[in-house]
Amino acid sequence: MDFFVSEIFTTAKGKLKEEIVNWGYQPCKEDYYKVLCSADVAVSTAIHEFFGVAMLEAVHCGCYPLVPSRLVYPEIFPKTYLYNTPAQLAKKLRNFCKFPHLVRLHTLEVNPVDYSWDRLKGGYRELLHAE
């Protein structure tokens, strides 16, 4: 599979190759969840997103989410997890690298169960059966 790869990712991979534990697409769902469960922080730099499923999966696995203050993210995530500029994102990540306990001991303020099918299906059924 060939995907468009931004130059910044190629540069980052080259500079950080000794530090990278996992990179890119995971061949099966179990591997994907293992990667998420081994991480402390999940970052989204999305410029196109409908629901934020990947970040909710990361939160479900215990990751501290850092998401842009745009798209669907402000509807799901409290301000604690939002950033407005690349500089703000870099500052938060730098701080977490210096003080990893800040994320490892943090109690997440987002409950991904609130967005699960079990929780939402009643509302969808009600909406779809409304006259």
Image (cartoon, helix red, strand yellow):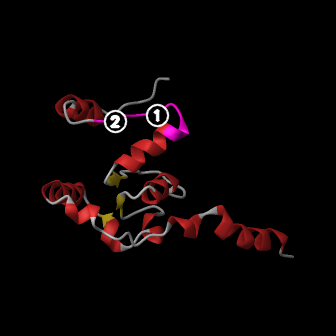
Would you name the residue on which mark 2 appears? 22
Residue occupying the far left of the picture = 98
* Residue 92 point in image, percent of width and height: 21, 60
For the residues bearing labels 2 and 1, Cβ distance under 8 angstroms? yes
Q: Is residue 117 above or below residue 48?
A: below
| Secondary structure state at the residue bearing disc 1 | loop
The residue at 84%/71% (across/down) is 129
The residue at 40%/59% (across/down) is 62
| Secondary structure state at the residue bearing disc 2 | loop
Closest to the observer, 11 or 43: 43
Residue 112 is inside the magenta segment:
no
| Quadrant in the picture for the C terminus | bottom right
Closest to the observer, 104 or 18: 104
Task: Mark 1: give few (<14), some (14-19) or many (20+) Cα within 10 Å.
Answer: few
Report the side of 15 relative to 56 (left or right).
left
Identify the amino acid type marked 2. Answer: Asn
Find the magenta span and give its range.
21-30
* Quarter of image, res 107: bottom left
Determine the main secondary structure of the stretch shown in magenta.
Answer: loop
* Residue 95 point in image, percent of width and height: 15, 60
The residue at 40%/63% (across/down) is 70
Would you name the residue on which mark 1 appears? 26
The residue at 35%/53% (across/down) is 42
